[in-house]
Amino acid sequence: MRQVIVLSIKDFEEELAQVFSGLQIQVYSKVDIEGYKNAHHKVDVGNWFGGRSDTDFSVMFFMFVEDSQADSIMEAMVEWNQTHDSAYPVHAFETGVIRTV
């Protein structure tokens, strides 16, 4: 089992939910995020919240899925970024689940 986390700007929320549905992801959670960037801090976080210096409204999806579904989600996010010409790419992360109770 793996946990997959997908971060995106709020504008893509509904489209990404449709992607998850198409991948047969039955259960996932969503958290609204208000992102901030300190203009004086020069750490490159890979264009995490784009080039704006004010508040950015984002969304985080997370789900616990089987290994094959995690692979499908990650591949779909790569494809998403390749087919959407956006200054705000989707970020996806995958972690292994060691134990559940």
Image (spheres, grey):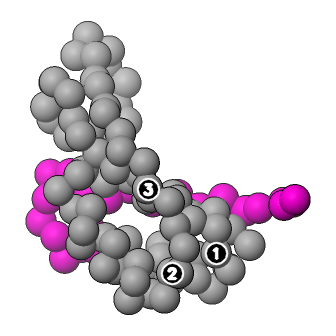
Q: Residue at x 29, y 45 (%)?
A: 58
Query: Does the segment drawn in magenta span residue 91?
Result: yes
Residue 60 position within the rendered picture, expressed as x and y whole percent measured from the top left:
41, 51
Magenta segment boundaries in residue numbering: 78-101
- Image quarter (top left, top right, bottom left or bottom right) of the C terminus: bottom right
Apparent side of residue 94 relative to residue 23 in the rendered image (left or right): right
Q: Is residue 11 above or below residue 46?
A: below
Q: Earlier in the sequence, mark 3 or mark 2?
A: 2
Residue 96 seen from this side: yes
Question: Front-most of 22 and 46?
Answer: 22
**SS at badge 1:** strand
- The amino acid marked with disc number 3 is Lys
Apparent side of residue 45 relative to residue 93 in the rendered image (left or right): left
| C-alpha separation, residue under disc 3 versus residue under disc 2 | 13 Å
| C-alpha separation, residue under disc 1 versus residue under disc 3 | 15 Å
Name the front one of labels 1 and 3: 3
Question: Front-most of 54 and 71?
Answer: 54
- The amino acid marked with disc number 1 is Val
Q: Are marks 1 and 2 in contact (CB under 8 Å)?
A: yes
Q: Residues within 10 Å of mark 2 (few under 14, many from 20)?
A: some
**Residue with the mark numbered 3:** 30
Q: Are marks 1 and 3 in contact (CB under 8 Å)?
A: no
- The amino acid marked with disc number 2 is Ile
Question: Front-most of 65 and 45?
Answer: 65
**Residue with the mark numbered 2:** 25
Query: Does the segment drawn in magenta span residue 96?
Result: yes
Residue 13 position within the rendered picture, expressed as x and y whole percent measured from the top left:
27, 62
Q: Earlier in the sequence, mark 1 or mark 3?
A: 3
Q: Residue at x 31, y 70 (%)?
A: 16
Q: Residue at x 35, y 39 (%)?
A: 33
- Asked which quadrant contains residue 48, the reply is top left
- Label ID, residue 65: 1
